[in-house]
Image: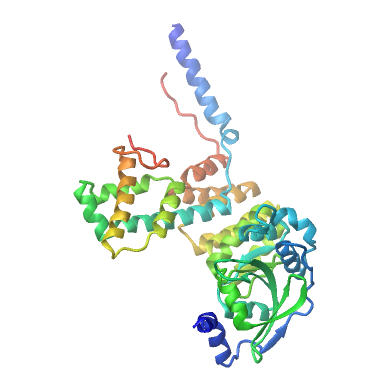
């Protein structure tokens, strides 16, 4: 009996909160201009990073490590905007591929990032490992 | 050999002076540009004060020293020059890194603050000055520089000294004016930075001028709306956000912000439509759009669902 009463109380409380407090408990939020621009920039950076992973030399090396391209892309998608920006600017400072040594440098950097995120290594302080 | 090395590099000057110009007057000097002679090392504050005053913004070098001058570096950093311009109420922005852009900007009535290396690359002597004019026939550039009110340099020499800063130049303008050489993406960044530190009404003026030039740019339209809203002008905000949604029907932020303002104006039905569109568009703004949707009062009473406990 007490238990049923308790359940009823909970139900009434929950429903009344649901309807009575509805308009006050959630605040509408204006999205600020710099949030939007930052998000747009982040999307561009993310696309740059994703296309860096698309480079043939990077792809072949990833395959050697048994990392499928779709996995690598998914890991890039999991990075925060700040991490993407940081990675992206570092990739920018590396010369574009063509030289085998440089290609390997790019590869090492990217793969270590990906394996960091996969939890296999922890080279970069800014990555979050996917558990 | 040394002479060729030293003289062979003013390529932009050569190209400029070689052709006839229909778009640029052959001589121009912004004589009304004020002059603040610099004190030791403080060319940054002096140049910035010159630039701000030319834009009609009251500024004194002494007041700017604390904003841009780094005693331990005995100089001012470029990023801080831009930021200080904004702090003093001006739209600060770099110009495209080219000599013809510099002349075009000056010809448009805007003096350009430039960074030069007056010495050799391995023993730099960085210096800020303000370009106020040029003479294409004589091949000269005219500057307010250091303690010289009217410094005339051969354009090739100027190019050498300016090249070493990678042709860095900036303008400070009264909000509502745009650089003649402004390009869309850098202008958006400059305006968003300006908006952060400015009062909404001033930011609105700045955005309005930009939207006139680029009426389809989403960030500019959203900035226009946000600044109107911040200034308390809800009808103008609705107008701006509505434009944004028409030009960019896939922009969740545009619909979200439109919904917020419509809600505040009491137009719940329209607000609901906009908010629902924002939610349906998904993406990184979904949570915000949901919050907006849920904050709109229900226009009709709902029946309580009957559930067995």
> Residue A64 placed where, x, y %?
19, 49
Q: Is residue B238 left or right of residue A125?
A: right
Residue at horizontal 48%, vertical 50%?
B278
> Residue B84 placed where, x, y %?
69, 57
- Is residue B127 visible to the viewer in this orientation of the structure? yes
Q: Is residue B90 left or right of residue A8?
A: right
Residue B172 in the image: above or below residue B278: below
Q: Is residue B248 left or right of residue A29?
A: left
Q: Quadrant of the C terminus of chain B?
A: top left
Residue at horizontal 55%, vertical 87%?
B14
> Residue B247 placed where, x, y %?
51, 64
Q: Residue furthest top?
A: A1
Residue B211 in the image: above or below residue B14: above
- Is residue B255 visible to the viewer in this orientation of the structure? no
Q: Nearer the viewer, residue B228 or B179?
A: B179
> Residue B200 placed where, x, y %?
69, 55
Colour mapping used in the image: rainbow
């Amino acid at each position: 009996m007490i238990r049923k009463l308790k359940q009823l109380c909970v139900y009434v409380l929950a429903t009344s909160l649901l309807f009575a407090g509805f308009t006050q408990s959630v605040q509408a939020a204006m999205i600020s201009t710099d949030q939007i621009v930052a998000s747009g920039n982040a999307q561009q950076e993310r696309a740059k990073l994703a296309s860096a992973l698309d480079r043939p030399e990077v792809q072949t090396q990833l395959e050697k490590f048994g990392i499928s391209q779709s996995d690598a892309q998914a890991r890039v998608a999991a990075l925060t905007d700040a991490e993407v920006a940081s990675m992206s600017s570092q990739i920018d400072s590396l010369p574009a591929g063509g030289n085998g040594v440089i290609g390997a440098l790019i590869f090492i950097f990217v793969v270590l990032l990906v394996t960091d995120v996969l939890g296999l290594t922890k080279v970069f302080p800014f990555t979050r490992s996917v558990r | 050999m040394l002479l060729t090395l030293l003289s062979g590099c003013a390529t932009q000057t050569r190209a400029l002076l070689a052709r006839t110009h229909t778009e640029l007057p052959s001589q121009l000097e912004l004589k009304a540009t004020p002059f603040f002679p610099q004190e030791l090392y403080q060319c940054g504050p002096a140049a910035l004060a010159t630039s701000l005053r030319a834009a009609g913004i009251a500024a004194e070098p002494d007041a700017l020293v604390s904003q841009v001058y780094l005693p331990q570096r005995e100089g001012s950093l470029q990023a801080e020059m831009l930021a200080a311009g904004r702090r003093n109420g001006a739209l600060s922005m770099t110009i495209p890194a080219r000599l013809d852009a510099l002349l075009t900007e000056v010809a448009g009535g805007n003096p350009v603050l430039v960074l030069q290396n007056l010495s050799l690359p391995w023993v730099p002597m960085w210096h800020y000055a303000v370009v106020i004019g040029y003479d294409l026939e004589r091949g000269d550039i005219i500057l307010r520089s250091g303690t010289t009110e009217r410094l005339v340099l051969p354009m090739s020499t100027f190019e050498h000294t300016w090249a070493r800063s990678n042709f860095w130049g900036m303008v400070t303008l009264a909000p509502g004016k745009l650089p003649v050489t402004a390009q869309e993406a850098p202008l958006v960044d400059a305006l968003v930075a300006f908006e952060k530190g400015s009062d909404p009404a001033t930011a609105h003026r700045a955005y309005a001028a930009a939207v006139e030039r680029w009426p389809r740019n989403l960030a500019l339209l959203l900035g226009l709306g946000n600044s109107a809203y911040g200034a308390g002008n809800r009808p103008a905000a609705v107008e701006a956000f509505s434009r944004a949604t028409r030009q960019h029907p896939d922009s969740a932020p545009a619909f979200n912000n439109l919904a917020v303002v419509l809600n505040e104006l009491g137009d719940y039905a329209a607000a609901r439509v906009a908010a629902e569109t924002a939610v349906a568009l998904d993406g990184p703004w979904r949570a915000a759009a949901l919050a907006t949707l849920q904050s709109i009062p229900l226009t009709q009473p709902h029946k309580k669902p009957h559930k067995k406990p």
